[in-house]
Image (cartoon, rainbow, N blue to C red):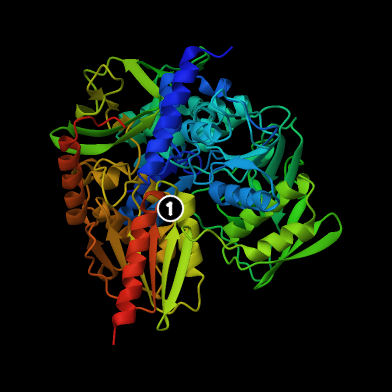
């Protein structure tokens, strides 16, 4: 028997959903928040699908969720997904409102849900996922996530014992979670062309999770990600069940057991490949064959809001998403930029604050995370100009100076739509956080137009 | 000045690396010793002028206390002889009598100061800080699960005008003993507070004008905001 307030919550949440849709607004979070206000334990009363796949971790959740949901939808499965990244309680409830009747009865075959790792204790016990993907764990927002040890402890307590875990074999933090749970590992083999990145400022794991001795990296891909072993005990990175064995320009080769499977691939960032192998692992565990999965991958591209590149008159304009307050995401973006050999001279626009540049300025935002991010990687000759944008652009400039970057290269920009950005370099890159996807797109379009209009 | 960074690989959770970068830039990398948690601190046996330790999680606090407890008397003696020591973020907690978890589990601290730190995981406390240290402005942030209880009326670090002191009922933040400063303020304290850095370290600092401009903006912004908790 459901309480009266459950039905009241359903009425208000569904009404707010309709109103938001009529107004052309995003209804991925607010209806759930309303429902929670009226009925705080509403998740208890919302029936979930028979099959639930949850995706959590610090980086890569949204892309992984979108790819899984998109594949399954293409297979004709009627599913619910929160594929716009609304991954805390309100977003999950909003998604489940779409998969249930007014009386809370489920009418979807499956649920594919991105779950914020910090919110997992308030979600996992109710949705009881059959499969949980943990993409990776790093330090993230100090405000919400504190430190990885804290996140590990809440995941350890909140993951249901029966869930099959799909884990990153190269992450010695998350790969050791819930040791009694059934598990499969994914990984990417070191590639011949790959250089190790062992000079990151931060490493969220330095010592052996078993004995506390210093971990030895056999291959350090970035931060604490890579293949490790301990010389004091027998701890070592687990063997992957699903491995990207080779990465070629337009193809990746997956190794499963002793068999090899080619997949077309346009992804150039290593993180895209981690997302891809995580998706393949889930779909294989669900019983799909490599041929069907590969056919799907041939048709898709990485969501353009995360990485978008336009070449006009031999000039390149790029927008890249790197979550603000997330030093690893930013370091990966900087590392990617420094490794590009064909981009010529580069201008960078850094929008590294969490508020949107359109409204809601947060004048007291904690910017300390920029000292955990590897701005040193931007100290390369090809980068000719760095424009720091936002309320704390002066603090950004100071960080760049401590990274050794020449002061003459650094300019300060106030948030504005009439930006005086010149396009005299071969490449212009906008690095922006999740709140500024729309603003970054506008800047990018404006830059492309300016280049087109140049004589 | 010879500086020792204590356990930086595990004690720099919230942008505390900024302080290390600042010290490297100010004094040169050759004057900075980085000691890992597996090593014995150098200040025990060598001439060190400043030790620095940043924020850490509860598990690391226990390791650090285990590591430093056998050398507590030496540390006190060195402090009495002028050693400078800066402990930021949760590094402050290890200097008290106890750290008490929500379930009552108690970790004995180094007992250099008479205070108790109590952990409460929800809600997490986040706030901007503005206060004065000997009339020198201090800005920064706190991001923590803890509040600390004890009398610091005679030996506080700053009098807070925005934000909270060692707990939500006091505006007195941190503890001082001779040249030891312990504060829950996290992040690049030395970069965000150029006048304090010059005063405490007794040297000219890099990018002083820019750092002052950034600090003035922070002071202005923090004072404009009604509620600095977020």
In this view, the residue in front, B147 or A435, is: A435
Is A75 above or below relative to A45? Answer: below
Give above or below for A426 relative to A301. below
- Badge 1 marks a residue whose secondary structure is loop
Q: Nearer the viewer, residue A56 or B71?
A: A56
Q: As drawn, is A398 to the left or to the right of A230? A: left
In this rendering, the count of numbered labels is 1
> Which chain does the residue under circle 1 lie in?
A
Give x and y (percent) for residue A262.
76, 66
Circle 1 Cα neighbour tier, 10 Å, few/some/many (<14 / 14–19 / ≥20): many
Q: What residue lies at 21% left-to-right and 37% top-to-bottom?
A: B138
In the visual, does B106 lie left or right of B178? right
Question: Is B127 drawn above or below residue A206 in the view shown?
Answer: above
Q: Quadrant of the N terminus of chain A?
A: top right
Which residue ends up furthest to the left in the rendered image?
B135
- Toward which corner of the image does residue A2 lie, by quadrant? top right
Q: Label 1, on which residue?
A: A373
Locate residue A44: give its quadrant: top right
Residue under the point 38% across and 64% down:
A430
Q: Is residue A451 visible?
A: yes
Residue B8 locus on image (x, y percent)? 46, 43
Expressed as whole percent of the image width and height from the top left, the position of residue B34 reads 46, 47
């Amino acid at each position: 028997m459901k309480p009266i307030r459950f039905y009241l919550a359903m009425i208000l949440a569904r009404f707010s959903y309709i109103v938001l849709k009529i107004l052309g607004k995003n209804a991925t979070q607010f209806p759930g928040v309303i429902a929670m206000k009226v009925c705080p334990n509403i998740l208890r009363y919302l029936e979930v699908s028979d099959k639930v796949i949850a995706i959590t971790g610090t980086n890569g959740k949204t892309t992984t969720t979108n790819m899984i949901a998109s594949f399954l939808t293409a297979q004709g499965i009627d599913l619910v997904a929160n594929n716009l990244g609304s991954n805390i309680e309100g977003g999950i409830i909003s998604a489940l409102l779409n998969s249930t009747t007014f009386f809370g009865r489920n009418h979807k075959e499956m649920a594919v849900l991105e779950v914020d790792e910090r919110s997992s204790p308030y979600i996992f016990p109710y949705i009881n996922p059959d499969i949980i993907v943990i993409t990776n764990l790093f330090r993230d927002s100090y405000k919400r996530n504190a430190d990885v040890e804290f996140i590990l402890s809440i995941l350890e307590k909140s993951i249901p014992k029966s869930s099959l875990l799909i884990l990153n074999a190269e992450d010695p933090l998350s790969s050791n979670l819930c040791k009694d749970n059934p598990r499969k590992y994914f990984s990417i083999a070191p590639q011949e062309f790959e250089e190790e990145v062992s000079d990151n400022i931060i490493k969220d794991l330095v010592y052996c999770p078993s004995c506390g001795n210093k971990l030895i990296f056999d291959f350090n891909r970035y931060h604490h990600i890579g293949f490790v072993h301990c010389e004091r005990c027998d701890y070592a990175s687990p063997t992957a069940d699903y491995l990207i064995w080779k990465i070629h320009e337009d193809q990746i080769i997956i190794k499963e057991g002793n068999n090899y499977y080619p997949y077309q691939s346009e992804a150039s960032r290593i993180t895209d490949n981690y997302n891809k192998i995580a998706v393949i692992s889930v779909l294989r565990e669900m019983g799909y064959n490599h041929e069907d999965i590969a056919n799907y991958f041939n048709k898709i591209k990485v969501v353009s809001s995360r990485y978008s590149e336009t070449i006009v008159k031999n000039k390149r304009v790029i927008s890249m998403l790197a979550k603000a307050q997330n030093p690893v995401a930013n370091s990966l973006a900087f590392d990617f930029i420094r490794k590009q050999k064909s981009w010529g001279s580069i201008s960078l626009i850094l929008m590294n604050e969490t508020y949107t540049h359109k409204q809601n300025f947060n004048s007291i935002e904690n910017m300390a995370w920029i000292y955990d991010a590897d701005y040193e990687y931007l100290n390369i000759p090809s980068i000719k100009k760095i424009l720091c944008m936002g309320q704390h652009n002066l603090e950004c400039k100071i960080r760049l100076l401590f990274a050794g970057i020449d002061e003459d290269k650094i300019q300060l920009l106030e948030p504005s739509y009439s930006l005086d950005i010149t396009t005299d370099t071969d490449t212009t890159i906008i690095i922006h956080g999740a709140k500024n996807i729309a603003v970054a797109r506008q800047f990018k379009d404006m830059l492309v137009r300016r280049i087109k209009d140049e004589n | 000045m010879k500086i020792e960074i204590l356990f930086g690989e595990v004690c720099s959770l919230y942008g505390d690396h900024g302080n290390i970068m600042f010290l490297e830039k100010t004094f040169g990398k050759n004057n900075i010793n980085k000691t890992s948690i597996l090593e014995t601190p150098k200040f025990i046996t060598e001439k060190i002028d400043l030790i620095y330790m940043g924020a850490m999680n509860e598990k690391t606090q226990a390791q650090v206390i285990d590591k430093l407890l056998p050398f507590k008397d030496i540390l006190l003696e060195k402090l009495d002889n002028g050693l400078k020591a800066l402990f930021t973020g949760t590094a402050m907690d290890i200097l008290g009598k106890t750290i008490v978890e929500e379930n009552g589990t108690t970790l004995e601290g180094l007992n250099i100061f008479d205070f108790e730190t109590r952990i409460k995981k929800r809600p997490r406390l986040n706030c901007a800080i503005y206060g004065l240290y000997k009339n020198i402005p201090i800005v920064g942030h706190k991001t923590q699960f803890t509040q600390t209880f004890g009398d610091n009326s005679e030996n506080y670090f700053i009098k807070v005008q925005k934000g909270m002191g060692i707990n939500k009922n006091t505006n007195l933040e941190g503890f001082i003993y001779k040249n030891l400063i312990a504060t829950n303020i996290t992040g690049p304290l030395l970069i965000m507070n150029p006048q304090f850095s010059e005063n405490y370290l007794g040297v000219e600092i890099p990018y002083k004008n820019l750092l002052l401009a950034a600090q003035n903006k922070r002071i202005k912004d923090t004072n404009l905001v009604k509620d600095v908790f977020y």
